[in-house]
Amino acid sequence: MAGCGEPEWRTKDIASLMPPLAFTLVDERGETVTADRYRGGVALLFFGYTHCPDVCPITLARLAGQVRDLPHEARDDMQILFVSVDPARDDPERLAAYTEAFGSAIVGLTGSRAQLDALTKRYRVTYGYGEKDAAGGYAVSHPSGVFAFDRDGEARLLIRDGDAPEAVRHDLERLLAEEG
């Protein structure tokens, strides 16, 4: 049966391994939002924080580039959900300023520790805080993978750091081509 049907995904297929997209958080406008707001399009879920020195800006720049490379009519059907796991420093105003630097496809979200704990537990990822330095700064450990959800909010793919841009583009275009 290997020659029949759809070609294989080029990133990690997680269909049926993870639950559908579900959360209640606060967006970068300070409004409470649920995952339902992002249904109907493809949603990419990434956990991080705005003070991140490397993984977050690199990942968001790559994802924003992928969206910019999509056909014009497909761009509005893709939303990147950047969930800050550092709510003490990442209020809605800071999130808005941060995500704006990467483009309009990215929405900053955060919540209470309880909301973030529930969401990270749902997707089997962890985060943690390092020791504060003399200036009060600290690092936050967080996952580097990006979860991709289809138009119905079903988990479909895990995009990892090592996935080639061509593989990511192929899979995002394939997800966008599916009917909801």
Image (cartoon, rainbow, N blue to C red):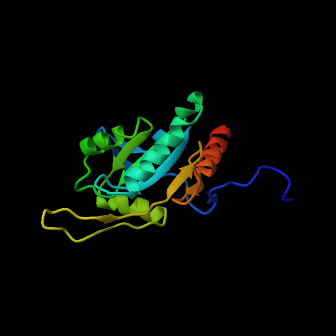
Going by the image, does 121 lie left or right of 177?
Answer: left
92 and 9: which is toward the camera: 9
| Left or right: 124 as drawn, with respect to 169 | left
Q: Give 163 or 174, whichever is nearer the viewer.
A: 163
- Tell me what residue is drawn at x 57 percent, y 61 percent: 18
Looking at the picture, how far across and down is residue 53, in whole percent? 32, 57
Residue 24 on image: x %, y %: 39, 49
Q: Is residue 127 visible in the rendered structure shown here?
A: yes
Q: Position of residue 14 (x, y in %)?
A: 61, 60
Please state the horizontal and vertical placement of residue 145, each as a whole percent of the image. 49, 59
Q: Nearer the viewer, residue 160 or 19?
A: 160
Toward which corner of the image does residue 55 lie, by quadrant?
Answer: bottom left
Q: Is residue 96 above or below residue 117?
A: above
**Quarter of image, res 114:** bottom left
Q: Residue at x 22, y 71 (%)?
A: 131
Q: What residue is shown at x 30% (from left), y 61% (from top)?
A: 113
Residue 35 visible from this viewpoint: no
Residue lying furthest top in this view? 73
Q: The C terminus is located in which quarter?
A: top right
Quadrant (top left/top right/bottom left/bottom right) for the N terminus: bottom right
* Residue sitting at the far left: 134
Q: Residue at x 19, y 62 (%)?
A: 137
Number of callouts: 0
Above or below, 171 against 141 in this view is above
